[in-house]
Image (cartoon, helix red, strand yellow):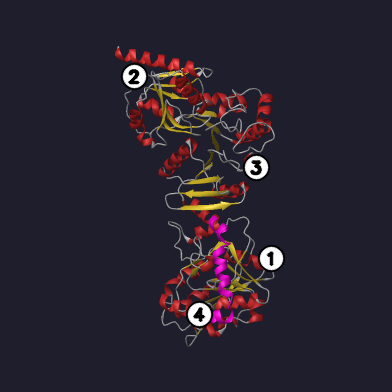
Amino acid sequence: MPPLPAKVDVIIPVYNGFEYLESLFDSLAQARSSPFRLLVANDASPDQRIQPWLERCLQDFPDAVLLHNDSNLGFVGTVNRLFEHVTHDFVLLNSDVQVPPFWLERLFAPMLTNPQVASVTPFTNAGAICSFPYFFTDNELPQGMQATEVDGVLGRLADAVAIDIPTGVGFCMAIRLEVAKRIGMFDPVFGMGYREENDWCQRARLLGYRHVMVPNLFVYHKHGGSFPSQQRQALADRNERILLERYPGLFDEYHDFIGRDPVRPVRDFLYLMVLAKQAQQPALVVIDNVIEGGAFAYCQELIANTLKAGTPVLHLLDDCRTGELRAEWKSRSAQLNLHFQDYPDWERVIEGIQPGSILINNIYSYRRPMDFLHWLGNPAMLKEIPVHIALHDFLMLCPSLFLIDSERKYCGLPESTICNQCYSRLPLDFPGGAHTITEWRMSWEKVFARAETLVAFSNSTRELYARIYPEHATKIVVRPHSMTHFHHWAVTVDLNKPLHIGIVGTIGWQKGWNIVRQLCEVIDAQNLPYQITVIGAMVPAFSAQCLNETGRYDKTKLPSLIAQSGANIFLFPSIWPETFSYVTHELVACGVPLCCFDLGAPAETLEHYAAGMVLRRDSSALEMLTQMEQFRVRLSSRTEQ
C-alpha cells in the first residue's frame, strides 16, 4: 500500500486514562508507513503519571508537539487549542483507541479521490453508527481475536467503497484542513465534550461537504477512557438538546439512517469474513433450496453433523417463497444471516471465507436456474475449491425432476429428439429457463465439469446419470443415505387375514396416486375382500369404500402406526425411479412384507430383502392385486412352516 503523498497531523487530547496510553502510542509507533506529526495535549489530568509519561513517550516521535493545559479545558477546548498548531489534513484521535498498520492510508483514501469529503471515520467496535459487528452497539472483540486480526480481515476488502454517513464519529475522524479553516473547529458551547463533532459535521454539510465511513479499516475503541459513564451520559444529553435547537430535523435524519441501516450489507459481509477467520477449520458451503423433503432432511442432518465436528457451514439459499437470495452462517460461536441480489454476489462471499469445499445439494425451485448454471459453470469462477453435487433427483437430466413425461408416465430416458419434443409440453412447477432439453443438459455438463464428485444414493441413479453424462461417469460415487435417525422395531403382521395393503407417505402423482386409485376402483368394482390403508394422505384427496387414510403422521411413530393399521402387505407405488427412498428403508427396517415396481432405488433395495417383491411397472391393477395376494399366501405358508 503506497504511503500518503503528504504528511498529516494526528491530534490527541488526553485526560486521565493512563492505562490506555501505552497501547495507543505503541500502535502509533508500529504504524509509521506514512509520515505523520503528533499533536498531544494533557488537559490538566489529575493523574500525575500522565505528563512525565507523555514527555518520555513523545521523544520517540520526531516533530511531536506536547501541550499542557494549566486548567481543565475539556475535550472541546483542548481540541481547539491543538487545532491552532495544525498545518496539514489531520486526524482527531481519542486516547482510548488502538490503530492498526497502514491505517492512515486507508483512512485518508476517500479525501484523496473526492475533494467534497470533509471527514472520514472507520469501523470500530464502539462507535455508534460505525460500530462493528453490530450496529449502534458497544461490541467486544470477537472471541479469541485481537483488534489487528479483525482489521486484517477488513483490510482485505477488495472494493472498499466509502459509504456516506450523516455525521463522522470523533473517536477517530480524519478531517480536511481546508474545511476546518473555513468553518472553524468545535463550538465551545459543547463544553467538556460529546456531540461537538455532530455540530461540526452539520456545519460542513450545509456548505455541501460529505462525511463518509471507510469499511476496510478497523480501529479499536475502548470507549470511555476520559469520563466515567454517568458523566459521559450527562454531557451527551445536555449537548443533544443544543443540537435539537440548532438543527430541528437532524435527529429525524439520524433515526431514518439508523432505521435503513445502509451500512448493514457491507458490515454483515465483513463480519462473515471475520467469523470465517475465527473458525478453526475452513467452512463447508452448501447451495440449497428451502423445500422440505428428502433432500432437505439430508441437508439438515449433514449440517448438524458438520457443525458437531467443529466445521462451520455457509448455507446459501434461493427462497422461492420470499423471493430472497440469502446466506446463513452457522458455527459453534455465532450465526449470521445475509441477503443478496443475484447469484454472482455469492461468489464474493465464497471467495471471502475461503471454504474447504462446496456442496450443491438441491436447486429445484430456483427462480432463475439458467442464470445460476451460467454463473456456476464459468471456468474462472471459484477456482481450486472442490465442488460436489448431490444427485437427490433427476433435475440435472430434465426439469421434470422425476423423469415423468408430458403424458404423466415414467419416460425411461429416450433419445434426445423425443426428449426435446416432450420438454416443450412439460407442465413444470418451476420452469427451467432453457429452450430445449439439449440446452439444459449442456449447461449442467459445464457444471459437472467443475465438480470433483457427483454423489448418488443408489446404483440405479448412477446408471441413469452415466447414460446421459458418460464423460463424467467416473465422478459418480454411490453413498446411500444414513438411516441412523430412524428408531424402529420389528412389526409382526397377520398374514392369515385377507389382503390388506399398506401405503406410507404423502401420495401425489409421481408417488403413485393413480396406481392407488386404480387399485381401489378394481377392489370396489369387483367387491374384493381387500382393504387399502394409507398411513399419510392422498394429494389430491380421493375416497373409495376400501380406502382408509390416517392423515399426515409423525415419522417417529411409524412402527406403531404400521402395527395399528392392520395392513399385512405394504406397497411402495412410486412410478419414477426414486434415487433413494427413506420409506422403503423404514419399512424394511420394520421387517414388513413390501412390494414396489421394478424402478430405481426401491427395487434395488428389495432385491436383497427376503420379504420383498418387485412388480412389473406395466402390470394392470388387477394383476398387481393378484400378485400381492399370491405373495401374502406364499409368505403365510412360509411362516406356518
Q: Label for residue 113?
A: 1
Dot placed on the residue nearer the N-terminal end, 3 or 1 = 1
Say whether residue 46 is magenta.
Answer: no
Tell me the element at label 2: loop
Question: Where 241 falls versus 349 (above or below)?
Answer: below
Dot placed on the residue nearer the N-terminal end, 1 or 2 = 1
Q: Label 1 sits on what residue type? A: Thr
Measure the C-alpha gap from mark 4 to mark 1. 31 Å
Measure the C-alpha gap from mark 3 to mark 2. 57 Å
> Where's the N terminus, which quadrant?
bottom right
Dot placed on the residue nearer the N-terminal end, 4 or 1 = 1
Q: Label for residue 193?
A: 4
Say whether residue 249 is magenta.
Answer: yes
Dot placed on the residue nearer the N-terminal end, 3 or 4 = 4
x 59%, y 75%: residue: 249
Tell me the element at label 3: helix
Residue range highlighted in magenta: 241-268
Farthest-out residue, bottom? 70
**Residue at the disc numbered 3:** 371
Residue 92 placement (x, y as % from top left) = 56, 74
Q: Which numbered mark, 4 or 1, is in the foreground of this view?
A: 4
Q: Do the residues labelled 4 and 1 touch (CB within 8 Å)?
A: no
Q: Which numbered mark, 3 or 4, is in the foreground of this view?
A: 3
Q: Label for residue 86?
A: none
Q: Label 3 sits on what residue type? A: Asp
Residue 430 placement (x, y as % from top left) = 60, 39
Q: Label for residue 497?
A: 2
- Circle 3 packing at 10 Å, graded few (<14), some (14-19), many (20+), is some
